[in-house]
Image (spheres, rainbow, N blue to C red):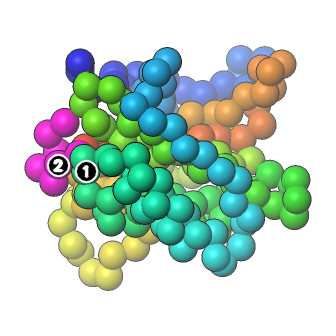
Amino acid sequence: MNPPEHRTSTPTDAAGAPLAGGTVTLLPRTMDSPTFLQSCHLTANASAGPNARIRVRAWLTMDRWAGNVDQASRVADKLVDNAVRHAKVFPSDGGIVTLRVYAFPGTDELAIEVDDALPRFPGFPQVANQSSEVQGPPKGLWWVAHYRGRLSWDVKRDVSHTVIGKTVQALLPPTWDGAA
């Protein structure tokens, strides 16, 4: 099975007007039957990133993901922390972000997704096209590039197709060299 395909577009609101943030890489289509799927809502506070790291480490160990569990858990931590610090949280229960983790059958490529309530991703091209080489102290979403992952995002819509936020996704290969 081939890795998920990437599509490029400009996200639009319910009326079809382009959202601020420019052209983005849309999320690969999710599989109907992932190898495994884990998800949770995390309270949006300073502990959310470390909490995501602990949960993802346990999930991937339990689900026997073939890749580097420590790398994947660090990326989950950074995605969640980024949403808490720079996005807008969903208001239920004092503010939450949603974390999902699943693997694609046949490739074992791992998708880590975080939903937040801000429907744009300012500076996405710079963040998504970072070098994987260390240039100063490592920060935030740089870890996705460092671990040979790919970063994507798209708007999140409710059942009536109203834009309610965004989903940010990191796809990580199961091997350090990036081969799925």
Residue 29 image position (x, y, % from top left) = 46, 22
Q: Is residue 20 above or below residue 133?
A: above
Q: Which residue is depicted at the point 69% across and 60% down? A: 42
Q: Is residue 117 above or below residue 106?
A: below
Residue 1 image position (x, y, % from top left) = 23, 18
Seen in the image, is 13 located left or right of residue 11? right
Q: Which residue is depicted at the point 76% across and 57% down? A: 96
In the picture of the structure, the residue carrying the numbered disc 2 is: 175
Q: Amino acid at mark 2?
A: Thr
Q: Callout 2: helix, strand or loop?
A: loop
Question: Mark 2 or 1 closer to N-term?
Answer: 1
Foreground: 147 or 130? 147
Q: Which residues are magenta?
A: 174-180
Q: Amino acid at mark 1?
A: Gly
Q: Main secondary structure of the magenta part?
A: loop
Q: Which residue is depicted at the point 70% across and 53% down? A: 41
